[in-house]
């Protein structure tokens, strides 16, 4: 029986000790042979015995074999020279030659044997190192070799497995007949076998079998190498299950979803950027590059909801195509944001675009772009699209209605101010008339004083300008126009608002005070709407002080810049304050405590301020009255940005 023992490598220390013993023995033997050869009259081919020394040292390695061959050959030459050269007997020279030849042949053969043993040893080591199981069986299916891989996988140690019948030990299940036929025909077989571990768990293995033959070609068993497929099978099944799950979700998702290859899109976009330029700024100034890049995206798959969204005939209309031509002009710049985000390493980006369907419908769509795992260089991108057309239409309608309501409220507010506005215009008009009359009088004098006349005309002009300014302010506030996002200086706006209510305040004996913490930065908002808010708050404050007789009526407008980048305007009065719970309700539409009130002023103020990205709040003061304040962001307000029309 073969055993694996022949292939085992001896441990390092004992091997060295064994070599030392061998070398000592070899030296003794060499010395003895040399002594007999030189000092005894024995007339035979003693030197031939040196081959024993060479064979003795053969296991110690190639160098030992070579050294022993060389030394024994030299000793043979020396002995011949010493004993026989002067007194050469008849056969001495031929015995000398025979000895040398024998030593040379033995040295060469030992060296060859050594190298083939080394090769065999290395091969055995490779078998040990293999993660796969390597089993050698004889023709009766008895195990004669069992590597570490087999020990680990099957749970049987080498000592337990050797000599056992493989089929019985591992409860093998495989098509025995079929394998036997193939092995007989071509000497090898590969396929799957099912075996059982020591602990009873079944294993599925990918196995390769090779027939072993003796030098005469007779079958002497099988070498097999097998790899465990159980884990791989389980992983395959799991990945198949998750693939099916993904497919089901993909197909049954209620929103349009498609999978695209964006590798070329990203390559086109990135390759176009000149050295030293930022991708974002480059794409912003070159929308045609984004168009080209998007045209290079190819749809790999699309779900039925995507077919519906694009009003396509079938999935095939979308698959293989790109949607470049479907994006309406502003779509490209929205998509450049996505390209920039993905290039920066983001795995998800979102944007809103307007698209043209195959059925000519225009749809507003929010696109969520996600990089799928496993793809390379943006080759697998999942795009989910949410149709927000109806939402946007409703939002536009809501904005129109809000703007109309705000306008109606402004007009109604101006109606409340009508008397004081009329007074405000009347004053300069009366002055103009008076100055006109005086000028006329001056002209009727026998010697008209033109200087006096000139001064009257100057006064008429300045009063006329004042009246025109009042009318202009009223006209601006009464105007009906789409909201704009302008950079505005709140100090100027407050001045204008004060000018409008000044006369009303005077009529109600209200003193106006203004406090500001220095120069205010601009806010970006709609001028008319913010003006409306200011006038509304000032009017409410004046009205809240109408019933106050026991203290000075004072209205204070305070402006500050907050640490979070907002400008805050607070309108404080010393009026009645809010009734209990009024702070919470006063922004509700139609909440009013005034007999002639409509209760929509503050609710409109709130929607205007929040629309511009600010906040409005109200609170009673500690002693008297209330303060209503609002904030507006410095720079571009977010809300105003998102409410921009999409195309
Ligand atoms: P209206 O002025 O038509 O009543 P508003 O929406 O402007 O509508 O105001 C709602 C209510 O909030 C007012 O009726 C009043 O009760 C309360 N209110 C508003 N401003 C003040 C204030 N400065 N002091 C006290 N109450 C106020």
Image (cartoon, rainbow, N blue to C red):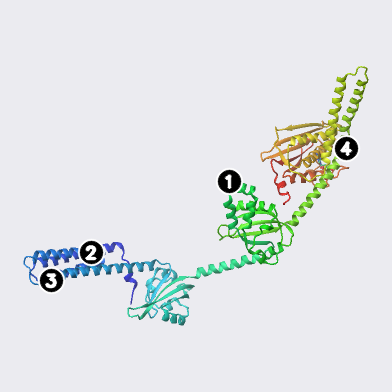
Q: Residue at x 87, y 20 (%)?
A: 450
Ligand number 1: quarter of image: top right
Mark 4 vs mark 3, CA separation in Å: 148 Å
Q: Do the residues under discs 4 and 3 have CB atoms within 8 angstroms?
A: no
Q: Earlier in the sequence, mark 1 or mark 3?
A: 3
Mark 1 vs mark 3, CA separation in Å: 93 Å
Which quadrant of the structure image shows residue 136?
bottom left
Camera-side mark, 2 or 3: 3
Q: Cβ(mark 1) to ligand 1 < 8 Å?
A: no
Q: Do the residues under discs 2 and 3 have CB atoms within 8 angstroms?
A: no
Q: Is residue 320 above or below residue 537?
A: below
Q: Earlier in the sequence, mark 4 or mark 2?
A: 2
Q: Is residue 311 above or below residue 497?
A: below
Give the labeled residue for mark 1. 277
Image check: 389 left or right of 47? right
Mark 4 vs mark 2, CA separation in Å: 125 Å
Dot 1: within a 10 Å radius of its alpha carbon, few (fewer than 14), some, or many (20 or more) residues? Answer: few
Image location (x, y in percent) of residue 200: 48, 73
Image check: 174 left or right of 293? left
Give the labeled residue for mark 3. 94
Image location (x, y in percent) of residue 294: 63, 56
């Amino acid at each position: 029986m073969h055993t694996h023992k022949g292939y085992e490598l001896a441990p390092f220390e004992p091997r060295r000790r064994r070599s030392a013993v061998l070398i000592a023995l070899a030296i003794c033997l060499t010395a003895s042979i040399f002594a007999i050869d030189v000092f005894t009259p024995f007339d035979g081919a003693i030197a031939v015995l040196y081959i024993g020394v060479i064979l003795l040292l053969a296991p110690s390695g190639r160098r030992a074999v070579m050294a022993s061959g060389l030394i024994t050959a030299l000793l043979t030459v020396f002995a011949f020279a010493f004993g026989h050269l002067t007194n050469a007997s008849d056969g001495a020279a031929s015995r000398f030659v025979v000895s040398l030849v024998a030593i040379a042949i033995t040295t060469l053969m030992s060296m060859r044997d050594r190298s083939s043993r080394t090769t065999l040893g290395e091969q055995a080591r490779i078998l040990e190192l293999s993660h796969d199981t390597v089993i050698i069986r004889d023709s009766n299916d008895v195990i004669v070799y069992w590597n570490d891989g087999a020990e680990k996988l099957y749970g049987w140690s080498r000592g337990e497995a050797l000599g056992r019948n493989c089929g019985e030990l591992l409860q093998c299940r495989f098509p025995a007949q079929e394998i036997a036929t193939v092995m007989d025909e071509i000497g090898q077989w590969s396929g799957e076998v099912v075996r059982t571990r020591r602990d009873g768990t079944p294993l599925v293995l990918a196995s390769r079998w090779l027939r072993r033959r003796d030098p005469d070609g007779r079958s002497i068993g099988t070498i097999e190498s097998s790899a465990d497929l159980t884990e791989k099978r389980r992983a395959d099944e799991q990945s198949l299950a998750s693939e099916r799950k993904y497919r089901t979700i993909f197909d049954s998702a209620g929103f349009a979803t498609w999978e695209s290859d964006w590798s070329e899109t990203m390559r086109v976009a990135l390759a176009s950027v000149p050295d030293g330029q930022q991708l974002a700024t480059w794409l912003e100034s070159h929308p045609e590059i984004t168009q080209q890049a998007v045209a290079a995206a190819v749809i790999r798959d699309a779900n039925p909801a995507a077919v519906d969204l694009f009003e396509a005939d079938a999935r095939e209309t979308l698959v293989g195509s790109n949607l470049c031509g479907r994006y309406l002009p502003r779509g490209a710049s929205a998509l450049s944001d996505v390209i920039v985000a993905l290039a920066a390493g983001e795995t998800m980006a979102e944007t809103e675009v307007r698209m043209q369907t195959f059925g000519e419908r225009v749809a507003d769509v929010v696109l969520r772009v996600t990089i799928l795992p496993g793809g390379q260089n943006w080759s697998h991108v999942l795009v989910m699209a949410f149709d927000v057309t109806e939402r946007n239409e409703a939002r536009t309608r809501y904005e129109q209605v809000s703007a109309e309501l705000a306008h109606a409220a402004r007009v109604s507010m101006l109606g409340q101010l009508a008397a004081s506005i009329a007074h405000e215009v009347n004053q300069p008009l009366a002055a103009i008339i008076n100055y006109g009359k005086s000028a006329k009088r001056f002209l009727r004098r026998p010697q008209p004083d033109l200087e006096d006349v000139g001064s009257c005309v100057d006064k008429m002009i300045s009063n006329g300008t004042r009246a025109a300014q009042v009318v202009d302010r009223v006209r601006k506030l009464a105007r009906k126009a789409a909201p704009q996002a302008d950079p505005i200086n709140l100090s100027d706006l407050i001045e204008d608002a004060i000018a409008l209510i000044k006369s009303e305040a005077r009529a109600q004996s209200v003193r106006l005070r203004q406090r500001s913490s220095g120069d205010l930065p601009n806010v970006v908002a709609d001028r008319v709407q913010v003006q409306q808010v200011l006038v509304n708050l000032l009017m409410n404050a004046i009205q809240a002080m109408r019933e106050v007789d026991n203290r000075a009526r004072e209205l204070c407008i305070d402006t500050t810049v907050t640490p979070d980048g907002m400008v805050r305007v607070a309108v404080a009065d010393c009026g009645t304050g809010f009734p209990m719970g009024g702070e919470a309700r006063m922004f509700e539409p139609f909440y009013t405590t005034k007999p002639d009130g409509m209760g929509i002023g503050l609710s409109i103020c709130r929607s205007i301020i929040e629309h511009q990205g600010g906040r409005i709040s109200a609170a009673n003061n500690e002693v008297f009255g209330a303060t209503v304040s609002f904030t507006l962001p410095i720079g571009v307000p977010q809300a105003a940005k998102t409410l921009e029309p999409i195309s």
